[in-house]
Image (cartoon, rainbow, N blue to C red):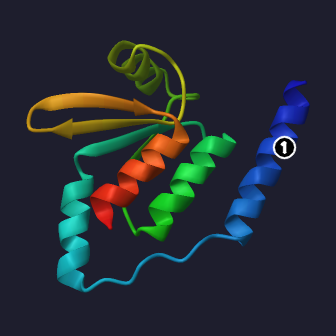
């Protein structure tokens, strides 16, 4: 079963690389503003998780550079996710605004949030 998951994961990543979306073209100043704003976000994810791929594709469409943390292979990031978010479930977007930290689960909710914040 682990081997099948590994194969399916590699297929997902290959298809994502082949059919990668194009990002929004912005002026240098506007993209710098977006990059600064994106520094307050972190996406906890597994590399081959289809829902994580879905969120990363939307980030690419919006030309948003959010930090990616591997919650599968990095024990530090996994612990941060469990302690901060309350569970090990990906994708999870950590939002740090105005001294507050919020954890947003569910790919569709994360995508809607990214569209609202960066469009």
Q: Is residue 46 left or right of residue 104?
A: right
Split into 4 quadrants, where in the image is the C terminus? bottom left
Q: Is residue 72 visible?
A: yes
Residue 12 against residue 88 in the figure, above or below: below
The residue nearer to you, when weighing 77 against 100, is 100
Across and down, in percent, residue 2 comes to: 85, 26
Q: Quadrant of residue 9?
A: top right
Point out the residue furthest to the left here.
98
Few, some or many C-alpha atoms within 10 Å of disc 1 (few <14, some 14-19, many ≥20)? some
Query: In the rendered image, which residue does mark 1 sit on?
Result: 8
Across and down, in percent, residue 94 comes to: 33, 35
Residue 11 against residue 109 in the figure, above or below: below
SS state under label 1: helix
Q: Is residue 99 left or right of residue 6?
A: left
Residue, x 17% and y 80% (percent of image)? 29
Across and down, in percent, residue 66 comes to: 36, 52
Across and down, in percent, residue 112 comes to: 43, 51
Split into 4 quadrants, where in the image is the N terminus? top right
Residue 92 against residue 112 in the figure, above or below: above
Residue, x 52% and y 19% (percent of image)? 88
Q: Is residue 66 visible?
A: no
Residue, x 89% and y 31% (percent of image)? 3
């Amino acid at each position: 079963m682990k081997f099948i998951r590994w194969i399916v994961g590699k297929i997902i990543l290959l298809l994502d690389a082949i059919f990668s979306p194009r990002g929004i073209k912005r002026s240098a100043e506007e993209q710098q503003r977006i990059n600064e704003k994106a520094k307050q976000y972190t996406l906890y994810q597994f590399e081959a998780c289809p829902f994580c791929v879905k969120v990363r594709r939307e980030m690419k469409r919006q030309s948003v550079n959010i930090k990616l943390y591997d919650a599968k292979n990095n024990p530090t990031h996994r612990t941060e996710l469990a302690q901060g978010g309350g569970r090990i479930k990906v994708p999870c977007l950590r939002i740090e605004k105005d001294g507050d930290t919020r954890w947003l689960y569910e790919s569709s909710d994360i995508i809607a949030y990214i569209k609202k914040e960066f469009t």
